[in-house]
Image (cartoon, rainbow, N blue to C red):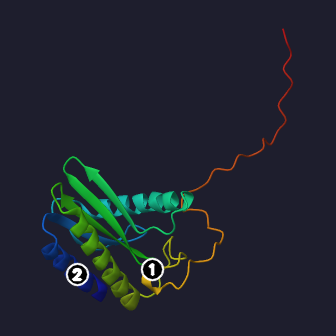
Amino acid sequence: MAVETDVLDELRRLRTRVPRLTGSLAATVDGLVLAHDVPETEPEGLAALTAAALGVAYRLTDTAGRGDFRELLVRGAGGYVATYAAGTTAVLTLLAEDRVNVGRLHLEGRRSGGRIADLVATRVGPGTGRHADRAVPEPAEHRATAPPATARPIGTLPVRTPQRPTHQPRPQTGT
């Protein structure tokens, strides 16, 4: 698939622009690898975990009323894992050392996420992933006014609804 080569080229350019970046992965929101540059890490496993974290992040931003998901940053003892939305069908995950310049990581991650979104949209077309029905966030400089308040769809995780029992409990007799 031609999109893989173009996305991989973007991941390699990203690695040259961000010192202390140790790996990058582009995947679909459903957890399928598009392209990767993650030595010493299983890309399929990372893509699956990214999809799971993405589902939680979508639900968290929705429940907290913070708008559409843009990015997720996790810091561990050995460094960072940063995930950026790349349109509605793809996601970019970056692995970085603990001493990375986080501002630079965000700047370049956001830019690359936009480029990957463009590559995926032009080569693959609109997606059908679980988040494909969500609108692509419009940059603030393109918005004339605040968006109208509308009902937000329920997040991607299942919501448990209490069910009424199908039978009537028997009355307890005292002994």
Q: Amino acid at mark 1?
A: Ala
**Under tag 1, what secondary structure?**
helix
Q: Could you say where residue 110 lies in the image, as x and y percent from the top left?
A: 31, 74
Mark 2, residue position: 10
Give the number of the disc on residue 140. Answer: 1
Please tell me whether mark 2 or mark 1 is closer to you in this view: 1
Say which label, 2 or 1, has the lower sequence index: 2
Q: Nearer the viewer, residue 45 or 69?
A: 69
Instruction: Please tell me whether residue 77 is drawn above or below residue 100 in the rendered image.
Output: above
How would you rate the neighbour count of disc 2 (Cα within 10 Å): few for under 14, some for 14-19, many for 20 or more?
some
Choose between 32 and 155: the one closer to the eye: 155
**Relative horizontal placement of residue 82, taking residue 150 as reference (left or right):** left
Structural distance between the alpha carbons of marks 2 and 1: 25 Å
Q: From where the camera sits, is residue 1 visible?
A: no
Q: Is residue 159 above or below residue 136?
A: above
Q: Is residue 2 visible in this depiction of the protein? A: yes
Depth check, front residue: 58 or 170: 58
Q: Residue at x 21, y 46 (%)?
A: 77
